[in-house]
Image (spheres, rainbow, N blue to C red):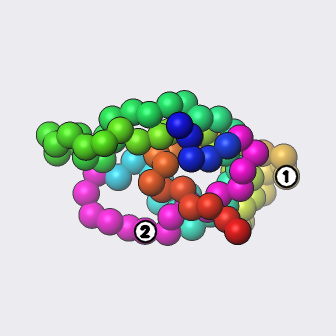
Amino acid sequence: MSKFVPGESVRIRDDYPPGHIRTPVYLRGKRGVVTRYFGDFANAEVEAYGRRGPRKGVYGVLFCAGDLWGDYKGPAHDVVEADLYEHWLEKLA
């Protein structure tokens, strides 16, 4: 069962743990909107070290390009969509 729903605003965890991390640095701490739930998948951040862990939900999250890069000069409607593991998403109040 998915923890987040399409249209829900989320913030990406602003964390910098060591190791194999699948969340781009430029997204950390940024706000986005969930576009879809892909399902639960093996966590590549754990499996990179030959370990198994619980499967994690993966979501498509949409970001305005101008919100990611303060000096962005492109069109205001430009967006970036990233597929992110659930444990990187934080609910917004």
In the rendered image, residue 73 lying in the magenta stretch gets the answer no
Please indicate, yes or no, whether residue 67 appears anywhere in the rendered image. yes
Nearer to us in this view, 74 or 46: 46
* Quadrant of residue 44 within the rendered picture: top left
User: Is residue 31 left or right of 13 when viewed as pictured?
Assistant: right
Residue most extreme to the right = 76
Residue, x 56% and y 40% (percent of image)?
2
Give me the disc on residue 76: 1
Mark 1 element type: loop
Give me the disc on residue 15: 2
Please indicate, yes or no, whether residue 79 appears anywhere in the rendered image. no
Instruction: Say above or below: 23 vs 16.
Output: above
Residue 50 pos. (x, y %): 14, 40
Which class describes the residues within 10 Å of circle 2: few (<14), some (14-19), or many (20+)?
A: few
User: Is residue 7 left or right of 45 when viewed as pictured?
Assistant: right
Residue, x 71% and y 55% (percent of image)?
9
Q: Which residues are magenta?
A: 6-20
